[in-house]
Every structure is written in C-alpha cells, then in structure tokens.
Image (tube, rainbow, N blue to C red):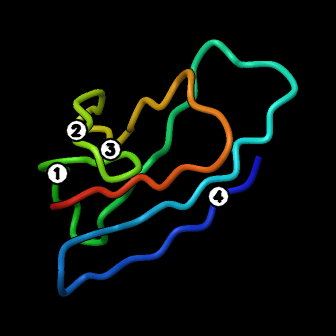
Amino acid sequence: MGVRYESSPNAAVTRATLALDLRAQPGKILVRFRHPEKKPIRSVTVNGQAHTAFDVEKGDVDISGLSGSATVESRY
C-alpha cells in the first residue's frame, strides 16, 4: 500500500493518491486528512465521484473495499 498527499491551500483541497495493492482486504481502510488551520471537511470525492463516508471532526475518509489505484480529494 502506498499513499501520496498533495495540498492546495488556496483552493482548499487536499488530494491523496493511493496504490492499494493488497493481498487481503482489511476490515477497514481510512485515509486521514488534517487541515493546517483545523478546518473541517465539507465534501469528499473518490475517483471523481461524490463520497459520503467521512468523519467531519476527525478528518477520516472510509474507503473500505477499494483496491487498485484511487484518488481521494477532501474540500474544506
């Protein structure tokens, strides 16, 4: 598994590019986002599609069940 984070503070977006080359699917996969000013997540997309499985306060995005490559974007 690999992850690369890119942030764009002016656009209020953080992107995580994931390589989920897993031998076995774990029970849960979370991607954690932290804004430097502690702003809560307002919306999330996974591979360009709206995604609602995220925790606004903790900044966790649940991507359980995904495999292969994925791009997760959080907007603040």
Circles 4 and 1: CB atoms closer than 8 Å: no
Residue found 41% across the figure and 65% down from its top: 15
Residue found 87% across the figure and 26% down from its top: 23
Q: Is residue 57 left or right of residue 71?
A: left
For marks 3 and 4 on the same chain, the one whose residue lies earlier in the sequence: 4
Circles 3 and 2: CB atoms closer than 8 Å: yes
Q: Which mark, residue 57?
A: 2
Quadrant of image for the C terminus: bottom left
Query: Looking at the picture, which amino acid does disc 2 mark?
Result: Glu
Q: Residue furthest top?
A: 27
Q: Is residue 15 left or right of residue 10?
A: right
Q: Which residue is mark 1?
A: 40
Q: Position of residue 4 (x, y in %)?
A: 61, 67
Circle 1 Cα neighbour tier, 10 Å, few/some/many (<14 / 14–19 / ≥20): some
Q: Which residue is mark 4?
A: 3
Q: CA distance from mark 3 to mark 4?
A: 16 Å
Query: Looking at the picture, which amino acid does disc 4 mark?
Result: Val
